[in-house]
Image (cartoon, rainbow, N blue to C red):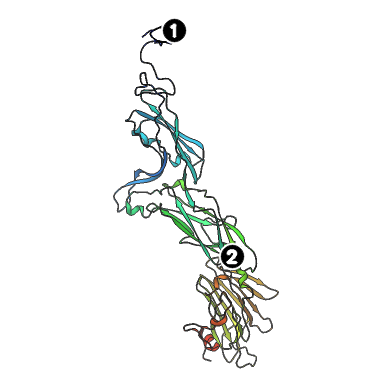
């Protein structure tokens, strides 16, 4: 081959070629060959399928009494692709989070791909889960000095994700919010028995209403929703992290009739993580909006009222007289449980067949509130306390909301389900003159006792529901069945 320009129309060609220098000729930019040199240069580029894969990396083993040492497990991200090039390439690996480059690895052979994993220590100081992870690779042929183009993966969404971020629930009813995790849970060991005890908990609360991340209870007066879960949240384990987790959410009945719809938000957070799950610290899951549709309007005028001596109106409007003495269940809803018991004693006004309220006990879940105005109960005599006594045993501040109106000498107690009680103490007689129970949606077909059974259609046919025998026709038989305690004198 000529080593200097031969000129046109030489060497049997219009534009002949010539060799400038000596030795192998490197393929021009944008082309390649098996050796990287002529002959055989072409513009063909080797393309591979690139993906991000979340997996568990085996780490150090730790001594655990009663178990053989097994490697610990740490969640990592791998830039996954098929080599398929007979070991003739090395690779540059680039990692991105939320579109920003985090770290890179250059000129890595396939056998050393474990050194290119993305670990939480690479990004945890700058980003919090949930995140978008992406990787890119650049292939370098062993015989070429010019690397190939960058080839990107699709974005991998790493974290915990609800089915959607906007829900609607009706007061007194429930919805189910499903969550999925795309990242495995780490563990101190890879032994199956130990992995069954490795998990990561995510607590649920309402932002702006409860700053205590470890709790899902809210102040009764402003509660919008109630969570039904084992520990006020959801939990993903090392062995079941791929399973869908469900959170049941109830629309809270606020007890305000015709108050209109309202919206609230649910937020998930972590309170503690193990050294193997530090990537979940301060997870940032977008808030989930829950619209609560008002349904309390159907409870308008649905009051149970007992007025000395006593005359009782049920939730559904049935009116009867009951003048026995003892301890009676006025209201009972086992959902909490929520109970209201009344003590009835002789009124002491010369009315032989009359009875007056002299104590009310309210149980709300594990808490108890008692108001008492009498020393004892009796059919024949009246023994009142000089000053009414109240006692509160509170196991949870959210079990009872108690307001006292000194001017009216009246207590108002609100239960977590929105049921409201008013207890008026007569300054003239010293007795509890009136007890009123305003039901919530949660009491429909659930509440029972002297107040009857509230129905959605205000049907009074089952109001006289006997404690053991179901609906009866006789009001005295019905009322006496709810007696818990009686004196003989």
**Mark 2 neighbour density, 10 Å: few (under 14) some (14–19) many (20 or more):** some
Nearest to the observer: residue 284 or residue 375: 284
The single residue placed furthest to the left in the displayed view is: 68
Q: Is residue 123 visible?
A: yes
Residue 22 lies in quadrant: top left
Residue 459 percent coordinates (x, y): 57, 79
> Residue 403 shows which numbered tag?
none
Return the residue at label 2.
220
Residue 285 percent coordinates (x, y): 52, 50
| CA distance separating discs 2 and 1 | 96 Å
Residue at 55%, 73% in the rendered image: 443
Residue 119 percent coordinates (x, y): 43, 40
Q: Earlier in the sequence, mark 2 or mark 1?
A: 1
Location of the N terminus by quadrant is top left
Residue at 41%, 42% in the rendered image: 53
Residue at 34%, 28% in the rendered image: 88
Return the residue at label 1.
8
Q: Is residue 438 above or below residue 177?
A: below
Q: Is residue 402 visible?
A: no
Q: Is residue 377 above or below residue 202?
A: below
Residue 294 lies in quadrant: bottom right
Residue 85 percent coordinates (x, y): 34, 31
């Amino acid at each position: 081959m000529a080593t200097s320009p031969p000129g046109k129309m030489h060497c049997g060609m219009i534009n002949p070629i010539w060799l400038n220098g000596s030795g192998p000729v490197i393929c021009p930019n944008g082309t390649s060959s098996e050796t990287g040199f002529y002959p055989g240069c072409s513009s063909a580029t080797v393309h591979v399928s690139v993906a991000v894969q979340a997996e568990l990396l085996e780490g150090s083993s730790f001594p655990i009494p009663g178990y053989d040492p097994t490697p610990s497990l740490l969640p990592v991200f791998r830039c996954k692709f098929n080599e398929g090039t007979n070991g003739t390439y090395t690779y540059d690996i680039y990692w991105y989070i939320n579109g920003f480059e985090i770290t890179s690895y250059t000129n890595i052979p396939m056998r050393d791909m474990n050194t290119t994993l993305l670990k939480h220590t690479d990004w945890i100081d700058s980003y919090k889960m949930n995140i978008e992870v992406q990787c890119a690779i650049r292939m370098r042929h062993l015989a070429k000095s010019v690397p190939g183009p960058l080839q990107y993966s699709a974005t991998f969404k790493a974290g915990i994700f609800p089915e959607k971020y906007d829900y609607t629930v009706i007061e007194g009813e429930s919805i189910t919010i499903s969550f999925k995790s795309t990242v495995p849970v780490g563990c101190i060991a890879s032994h199956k028995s130990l992995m069954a005890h490795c998990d990561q908990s995510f607590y649920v609360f309402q932002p702006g209403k409860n700053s205590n991340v470890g709790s899902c209870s809210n102040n009764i007066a402003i509660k919008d929703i109630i969570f039904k879960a084992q520990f006020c949240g959801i939990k993903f384990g090392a062995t079941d992290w791929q399973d869908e987790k469900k959170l049941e959410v109830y629309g809270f009945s606020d007890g305000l009739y015709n108050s209109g719809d309202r919206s609230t938000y649910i937020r998930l957070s972590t309170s503690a993580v193990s050294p193997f799950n530090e990537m979940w610290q301060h997870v940032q899951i977008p808030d989930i909006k829950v619209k609560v549709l008002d349904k309390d309007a159907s409870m308008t005028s649905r009051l149970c009222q007992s007025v000395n001596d006593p005359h009782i109106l049920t939730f559904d409007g049935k009116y009867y007289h009951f003048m026995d003495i003892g301890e009676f269940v006025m209201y009972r809803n086992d959902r909490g449980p929520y109970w209201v018991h009344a003590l009835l004693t002789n009124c002491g006004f010369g009315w032989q067949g009359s009875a007056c309220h002299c104590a009310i006990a309210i149980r709300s879940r594990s808490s108890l509130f008692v108001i008492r105005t009498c020393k004892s109960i009796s059919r024949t005599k009246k023994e009142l306390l000089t000053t009414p006594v109240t006692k509160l045993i509170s196991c949870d501040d959210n079990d009872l909301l108690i307001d006292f109106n000194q001017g009216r000498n009246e207590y108002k107690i609100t239960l977590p389900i929105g049921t409201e009680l008013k207890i008026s103490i007569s300054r003239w007689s010293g007795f509890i003159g009136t007890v009123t129970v305003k039901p919530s949606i949660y009491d429909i077909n659930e509440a029972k006792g002297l107040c009857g059974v509230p129905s959605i259609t205000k049907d009074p046919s089952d109001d006289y529901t006997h404690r053991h025998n179901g609906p009866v026709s006789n009001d005295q038989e019905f009322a006496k069945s709810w007696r818990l305690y009686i004196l003989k004198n």
